[in-house]
Image (spheres, helix red, strand yellow):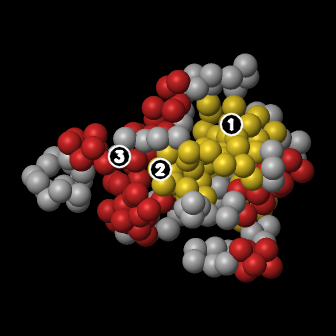
């Protein structure tokens, strides 16, 4: 097949050279609610074309590759005094897979225990392309299923306004859970 980025022949959807040159993760940080850190590995504009594959069959392979490069490396180096649950925000399946579940699964490590389908939105509102005002007026109404860990890493693919993560944090806090931080693949903040 041909590499999606450079069109050279490759055994993977993105060749090793392009992975090294274009997909080396960085670490971007912002806060939601004033006290919760959100760490992202890429700026949205830098991988936008790849992120748009999430609603296609190709998206499974692209998200798996990005998860391995960014989330996998992070998990290898993460330590905490207790086990931490990682939860993908709203891991419902579209197009045969859940992109947040792919990211979440890759976090499995000595200290991180991925838990699946533990936080889901009762409202099926989609925030894609919607304004901050729209998001305020149409809450996702997250529901939390029981799991044993007290500490949580929240996982999502993109952070835009932070509204989805904020609502998820609030739902978890109501259940006595403590969000250590949030991890996203890309930050869409315009700075």
Horizontal side of 15 relative to 112 (left or right) equals left
Q: Residue furthest top?
A: 81
Q: Foreground residue, 187 or 1?
A: 187
Q: Which residue is mark 2?
A: 42
Asked if disc 1 and disc 2 are in contact, CB closer than 8 Å, the reply is no
**Callout 3 touching callout 2 (CB < 8 Å):** yes
Q: Position of residue 89 (x, y in %)?
A: 65, 55
Q: Residue at x 81, y 50 (%)?
A: 34
Does 58 appear above or below 103?
below
Which residue position holds label 1? 85
Mark positioned earlier in the residue sequence (1 or 3): 3
Task: Give me the residue at 36% from left, 65% from top.
Answer: 49
Residue underneath mark 3: 23
* CA gap, disc 1 and disc 3: 26 Å
Badge 1 marks a residue whose secondary structure is strand
Counting from the top left corner in percent of width and height, residue 53 is at 38, 66
Front residue of this view, candidates 174 and 14 = 14
Residue visible at 56% across and 45% down in the picture:
28
């Amino acid at each position: 097949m041909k590499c999606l980025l450079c069109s050279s022949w490759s055994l993977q959807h993105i060749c090793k050279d392009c992975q090294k040159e274009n997909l080396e993760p960085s670490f971007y940080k912002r806060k939601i609610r004033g006290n919760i850190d959100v760490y992202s590995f890429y700026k949205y504009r830098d991988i936008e074309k790849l992120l748009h594959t999430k609603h296609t069959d190709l998206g499974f392979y692209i998200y798996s590759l990005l998860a391995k490069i960014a989330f996998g490396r992070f998990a290898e180096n993460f330590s905490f005094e207790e086990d931490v649950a990682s939860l993908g925000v709203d891991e419902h399946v579209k197009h045969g897979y859940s992109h947040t579940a792919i990211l979440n699964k890759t976090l499995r490590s000595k200290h991180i225990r991925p838990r699946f389908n533990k936080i889901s939105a009762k409202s099926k509102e989609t925030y894609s392309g919607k304004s901050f005002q729209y998001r305020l007026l149409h809450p996702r109404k997250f529901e939390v299923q029981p799991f044993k860990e007290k500490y949580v890493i929240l996982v999502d693919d993109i952070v835009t306004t932070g509204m989805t993560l904020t609502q998820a944090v609030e739902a978890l806090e109501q259940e006595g859970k403590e969000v250590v931080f949030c991890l996203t693949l890309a930050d869409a903040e315009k700075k």
